[in-house]
Amino acid sequence: MIRSDDGTCPRHLIPRSAIIEMAKIFLFFLVLLTPVSAGSFRSSNELFEVNSGILPHKITSTPLNSHLRVRGGSDQDEERYSRQVYALGKRAHGLIRTSKVYLDGPPSSGLLYECAKNLVLSGVGSITILKPSSQKNKLDDDYHCANFDDLGRSYQQAARSELEVDQVVDEHTLLQNYLRRLNPSVKVSVMTLDEVKKCSEEGVFVCIDRAYTTQVQWNNWCRKANIKFVSIETAGLYGKVFCDFGNGFKVFDRDGEDPLQTPLGKAKVLIETGEIRVNCIDGEKHDVSQGDLIDFRDAAGNSIGFNCTVMKVINPKQFLIEISGSLSANDFCEEINQRSTSFSRLKVPEDVDFNTLDSVLSKAYSDDSLFSLCDLDKTFDRNRRSAILSCFLALGEFIGEEGFCPTIENLEVFSGHASKSNAQQDHTTLSWKRAVRCFTKTCRGKFCPVQAVIGAIGAQEALKAASGLYYPVKQFLLFDCDELIIEDENALKSTETMNTSANGQTYVIGERLCERLSQERIFVVGAGAIGCELLKNLASMGIKNLIITDMDTIEKSNLSRQLLFRDRDIGVFKSVAAQNTISMYKPDIDIEVHTSKVGDDHGPFDEDFWSKKVDIVLNALDNIDARLYIDSQCVAHGKALVDAGTLGSKGNVQVVVPHQSESYGASVDPPEPAIPVCTIKNFPYLISHTIQWGKELFDAFFTQRPKRYNELSQLLKDNSPDSVTRKIISELGMEASRETSRELLEDVESSIVEDISTFRDEAITWAATCADGLFRQEIEVLLMKHPVDSVDEDGEPFWSVSRRVPKSVYYGVDAHDPQQMKINDNLVAFVQNCARLRIESCNPHVAKDRIAHITREEAVSALKTSNLSPEDKGIHARIQFSKDLLKDEIREWGLIGFEKDDDSNGHVDFVTAASNLRALCYGIAPVDTMETRRVAGQIIPAMITTTALVSAFSCLEMVKLVQKASLEVHRNAFVNMATPFLAFTRPMPAEEVFNIKGRRFTIWDRTIIKESKRNSKTGGITIRGLLARIIKKTGLDDDLFQVSSISYGPYLIYANFMHEHDDELLSKPVWDVIKEALMHDDEFSERDSDDAKKSMPSDPLKHQTFVDCSIIIEDIESGDEMEIPPIRLVRRSKRP
């Protein structure tokens, strides 16, 4: 019923608090601070986002049957990076695969490992790890405290275990070999500082956990060597990112969003103002903003050369434009309406100038535009931001003088250093003093979630530098989570002499909180991309009790973003492989592993599990239904939940705090818009319509048709043709029966062919005949029914913008017509793949390598003779003939299900060819297999950097949950690494949904009713007894109120208008009434199921100690109804 996967399904709806709070603040902030003109907010079914600027296309169309292969790539690349390519596009991914990255940092740094992990899984071309020359830098050695870096220790422990090396191996070599194991296709080398400085190769330099003076030295060297520079560091609960990509750095695509190809309704000149208004067709919305350039396109998807600028957005369906050139407004509209069928916004590259670190500091304290958005509440506090930046600058100066990292005992001295680095700032404000104090308290230790946040952002910035995709951090980004600080002198005392498994974390957040963390039982639902990152973080944070479940097995495409898996793990359950790897990070960790569905009634996640075995749930799921199920269990059992999801560069985290916040299910996501059947069948106008049609055709040809043949052939074998004919007509109707009988005869004739070569020839002919029927004959029939000049019942033209006039396509011999060449190529591909799949379906036991490849010449030959209509027979005659042909031994056809990830099976190739031919019939621009796979397979783009970021935020919220922090301290996160944009909002409080006698209730509240001893002896409390107990327990007057209804989930088990005088029902135990409802539903489901393999349980409530029932109360006098909190009926003892 429910499956857990890699967590790549974000929350589509932003909580109400975010919409109001963030919209006002963020729009103001953009106008005030952003150096380029900002677009408007766009609300989409993915995430709330901001679109700024005018940027280029991400993915360009490629020829039919092209693959994902890019520069430096291979067939292995296509499968490993397929989800990433959908996020980045081919161009950017190709540049990343050939990029060179230099990494300089302490070899024991968890931040170094984290950033390197993200880069190597992203598939950069090469990584060069820098190691010191013979002359060491004391400041660099003192700047990083290895004993207080838990993440670094965990990574090194895992590397030594996996590589089977001892403690004395060189740390740089250890990192090198570990990265090679993570992704064998990335070249990883180690070079000394002197060797690197002699190197002239361009690339990206990432400076990690180094002092300010070292950062400046490397930044200046990178400028001279034309190398992009990124520096990242963390100190306790604080993190900093700085970027310098030089002058004139070209950003090819600011946000990575593909512009919508919006069907054009009409362009019209407004009589009152002379302005030109552009309308979408009915049912469609545009995605343009004021200032965007608009490109109009013809039916083939080609630009018609009329560009214009959006002057004003009227609504989601209309906007005003300004044109340039010699054409008048009326002539322009006439040209557009005649020649264009769609429009899209244009993206144009932009140049971005950077300053070096030493030169930009003089502006940093006064120029807000130098800081990227990160936590709007904190970003607006300039004094606080300046204090944190000053602390990072002062840290190296203090360590250089004292030889150690400051502690709270050194607050006065360190505060002096911080104040000196920014003499103009007011150092007496509370925000300055608290920031410096908290920084000093925690800076010696490294905190895993903060390292994961900065490691993800740092890696993403390096990828931006290498590809020009997405807008970079310009130039600082500061992040912190100092809301975790408890203002207590003893809470964060020095821990130099402590020897715990998490020294750094203990130093940062306190020993007591760390002890509580180690005792928590954490349930991680899903061991995919987010799940892997969560597990790595949890192990590094000293969590000792983990429960993991994931029913999926590892595929090649998982390896680009799931660090716990290797090539050898392909085919293994994710949860099992994750357990094996995590034990390398922390050998003493206790992990309980499952491969079960989280919603399986007969699995391990029963009532006892939810009540006693789990404290906090961390979601890493890929679908809404599973999330809602987990959410319902958490609400029912009062468990805390943190949910995370990603979609390409975007991600979000939502925390659910028991008895305080709203639940995940409190905000309902908008349903995905469904495509009308008539649009798919007869009137497509978007490529998504034809792809859906092609996928349905695949299902009809290779799943439903073989299944129907297997059923009818067996039925025909056991019954007379007359009875079978009557049955088919009665069930399907006359029209469908004609088609079914024709298909049955075709399939029976094919089934009796013994020779595979003969059948192969017949399959090719059959495929060509299908192509002729689908793309020529059916179109001609439609046009005969609705001629081009026909009108509808209102007298309006039948064919309009949303009803495009189709034209039939067929194989032609004009080799110089580009359009005909597209048609020919797609027809050939259709025949090749259609015939191949029919052969495989009819011969499921024949090895695929025994079926010879269908050549282009064979396909062309069949297409040239495919327009001959077969002789028609009546329904009964076809069925009679089929009966005569059937042999005693009936060959069963194989059912082929659509599989999107296997390039060799021809599934996507078939759908692509079918979709493109359909598109060419209706004047829609065709697409390549990559785009077809994305739409037909509903593929969610994914990147390791976004995954690592949201996982880190999840772990931060988990710490707050263990800390028992107030709701005001918690944060829901909404991020877009492309722009970059990190926003946090407080969770919405649980809505007060009930109010009886002045009492207020939320979804977390239950009215508890416990069975008595006497009840338990007689099978449980009866419906009559429950009715009385409800009125009494809620304190209502039974003369004024009565129970109107009782429901268990979707089952109505009592209604007063039906059962008030039903003594039989009223005398039954509640448990039996619920059980009967469940059993009846199971019987119905079992009867209608195609694959009913499991027997129904004798008692579906056997393992439940309580049930929650929804109650409606009625005011007897007025008849008004109101819902009260659910009644929790607690069983006195479990029955055997």
Image (cartoon, rainbow, N blue to C red):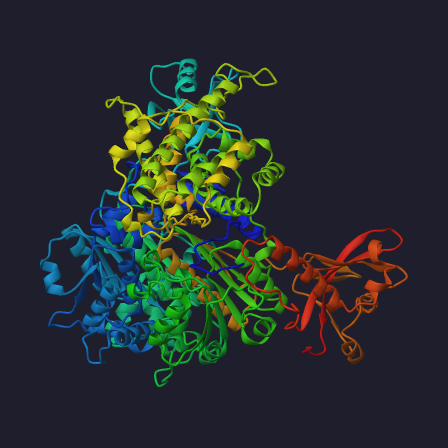
Quadrant location of the N terminus? bottom right
Viewer-proximal residue, 154 or 633? Answer: 633
Residue 36 shows in the view: no
Where is 782 relative to 830, above or below? Answer: above
Q: Is residue 126 visible to the viewer in this orientation of the structure?
A: yes
Viewer-closest of 341 and 1054: 1054
Instruction: Out of 565 and 335, give the one closest to the viewer.
Output: 565
Answer above or below: position of 1104 versus 689: below
Say whether residue 696 is left or right of residue 1134: left
- Residue 403 location, quadrant: bottom left
Q: Residue at x 37, y 66 (%)?
A: 572
Horizontal and vertical percent position of residue 259:
39, 37
> In the image, what residue occupies the spot 50% across and 69% down?
960
Rendering coords of residue 26 (x, y %): 47, 47
In the image, is residue 370 above or below residue 295?
A: below
Say which quarter of the image contains residue 1008: bottom right
Locate the C terminus and report the quarter of the image it occupies: bottom right
In the foreground, 304 or 392: 304
Tally of numbered discs? 0
Asked which quadrant contains residue 343, the reply is top left
In the rendered image, residue 744, in percent from the top left (x then y), is placed at 48, 39
Q: Is residue 353 left or right of residue 754?
A: left
**Which residue: 22% across, 64% down?**
180
Q: Could you say where residue 556 lies in the image, as x and y percent from the top left?
A: 32, 58
